[in-house]
Image: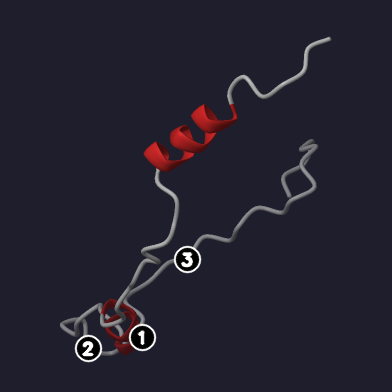
């Protein structure tokens, strides 16, 4: 931390120098990123949409006793 600083978090040290690997021409994409990109995503067809929620709200309208 710098003198006179009131922050409880220490500053991150600066990194100087070359690349991480010896070969600076290597691709930056890692195999882990490839496996994430290959995953498929599916959605539940039974999930309520905005219009369904509105319909349920309309069905309950007027069923309140305000005495």
Give the residue displayed 58% in from the left and 61% down from the top. Answer: 13
30 or 63, which is in the foreground?
63
Q: CA distance from mark 1 to mark 2?
A: 20 Å
Per the image, the residue denoted by label 2 is 23
> Which residue reaches farthest left?
25
Q: Is residue 42 left or right of residue 9?
A: left
Per the image, the residue denoted by label 3 is 15
x then y, percent, for residue 2: 72, 45
Q: Secondary structure at mark 3?
A: loop
Residue density around tag 3, few if under 14, some if 14–19, many if 20 or more, within 10 Å: few
Q: Nearer the viewer, mark 3 or mark 1?
A: 1
Q: Which picture quadrant has residue 19? A: bottom left
> Which residue reaches farthest right?
67
Q: CA distance from mark 2 to mark 3?
A: 19 Å
- The quarter of the picture where the C terminus appears is top right
**Disc 3 vs disc 1: Cβ atoms closer than 8 Å?**
no
Q: Which picture quadrant has residue 47? A: bottom left
Q: Is residue 60 left or right of residue 16?
A: right
Q: Secondary structure at mark 1?
A: helix
Per the image, the residue denoted by label 1 is 32
Q: Earlier in the sequence, mark 1 or mark 2?
A: 2
Q: Is residue 62 left or right of residue 38?
A: right
Give the residue displayed 31% in from the left and 81% down from the top. Answer: 39
x then y, percent, for residue 12: 60, 58
Q: Is residue 19 left or right of residue 2?
A: left
Residue 1 vertical placement versus 16 (above, below): above
Residue 7 vertical placement versus 10 (above, below): above
């Amino acid at each position: 931390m710098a003198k006179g600083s009131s922050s409880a978090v220490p500053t991150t040290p600066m990194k100087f120098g070359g690349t991480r690997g010896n070969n600076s021409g290597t691709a930056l994409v890692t195999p882990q990123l490839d496996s994430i990109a290959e995953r498929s995503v599916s959605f539940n067809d039974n999930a309520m949409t905005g219009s369904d929620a509105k319909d349920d709200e309309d069905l309950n309208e007027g069923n309140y006793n305000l005495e």
